[in-house]
Image: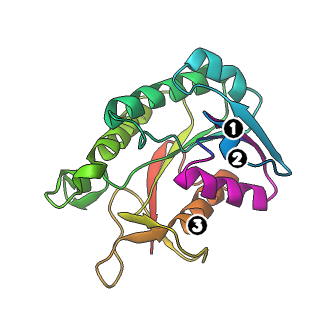
Amino acid sequence: MNIVLIGASGYVGSALLKEALARGHRVTAVVSNPAKLAAQPGLEIVKADVLDSAALAPRLQGHDAVVSAFSGHAQAEVYGYYVQGMRSIIAAAKQARVPRLLVVGGAGSLEVAPGVQLVDTPEFPAQWKGTAEGAREALQLLRAEPDLAWTMLSPSAHLEPGERTGRFRLGTDQLLVDARGESCISVEDYAVAMIDELERPAHARRRFTVGY
């Protein structure tokens, strides 16, 4: 497929880039700093401001799908920056009439009990709260879109470097926990699940999650 990957040089984006290229997809990487990416076969690197939807839209046109790994981690005001960026990406995707938009979500909006989301529990780490609340808002923005063909993939609570095993479980809106009571997924296996969804759509206009 011919896809756009927003945030391809980031923590999750770099794993998605590696997985997509390994499977033979052609990737247009939209990044703020092209120097962070090395040239590779099948990769086109494009500099663009994600917050400028009018400038971003032409970059998305003509592709089979857009995968967004946009993140506000490096910003001082994470929540506002993330939500602004997601609004821009959604607007650009609609303007470009891309067939599909796949979004990297957060674990914070997953339920740990009926009606209780992880981000609202006392144990949720303060340093990730802005990003988690931004991702929760992004999910609401997507759910409010009547026509956009979107999918969001939320990771487990701990998304860490590890192995690409290809063995994991999928869920919907509840946090996945293993037999030891842990909620984990490697960033490599997260990328497998996302590119699986790209190739074989199973969660149109829905959020889903992945974990061990």
Indicate which label's residue lies in the foreground, 1 or 3: 1
| Residue 21 position in % (x across, y down) | 76, 56
Task: Tell me if 52 is positioned left or right of 180 in this view.
Answer: right
For the residues labelled 1 and 3, the Cα–Cα distance comes to: 22 Å
Q: Which residue is mark 2?
A: 37
Q: Depth check: give the residue in front, 56 or 149.
A: 56
Which quadrant would residue 80 be assigned to in this image?
top left
User: Which of pointers 3 and 2 indicates the residue nearer the eye?
Assistant: 2
Residue located farthest toward the left when viewing the structure as drawn:
122
What's the residue type where badge 1 is placed? Pro
Seen at 27% across and 57% down, the residue is 111
- Residue, disc 1: 34
Residue 147 in view (yes/no): no
Q: Earlier in the sequence, mark 3 or mark 2?
A: 2
Q: Nearer the viewer, residue 147 or 38?
A: 38
> Is residue 24 located in the magenta-colored stretch of the structure?
yes
Image: magenta residue range: 9-31
Q: From the top left corner, tell me how far across and down residue 139 is, in percent.
A: 39, 40
- Find the distance from the CA under tag 3 to the CA under tag 2: 18 Å
Amino acid type, residue under disc 2 in the picture: Leu
Which residue matches tag 3? 188
> Contact, CB < 8 Å: mark 3 with mark 2?
no
Q: Quadrant of residue 192?
A: bottom right
Q: Tell me whether the residue at label 2 lies in contact with that at label 1, contact meaning CB atoms closer than 8 angstroms.
A: yes
Q: Is residue 184 magenta?
A: no
At mark 2, the secondary structure is loop
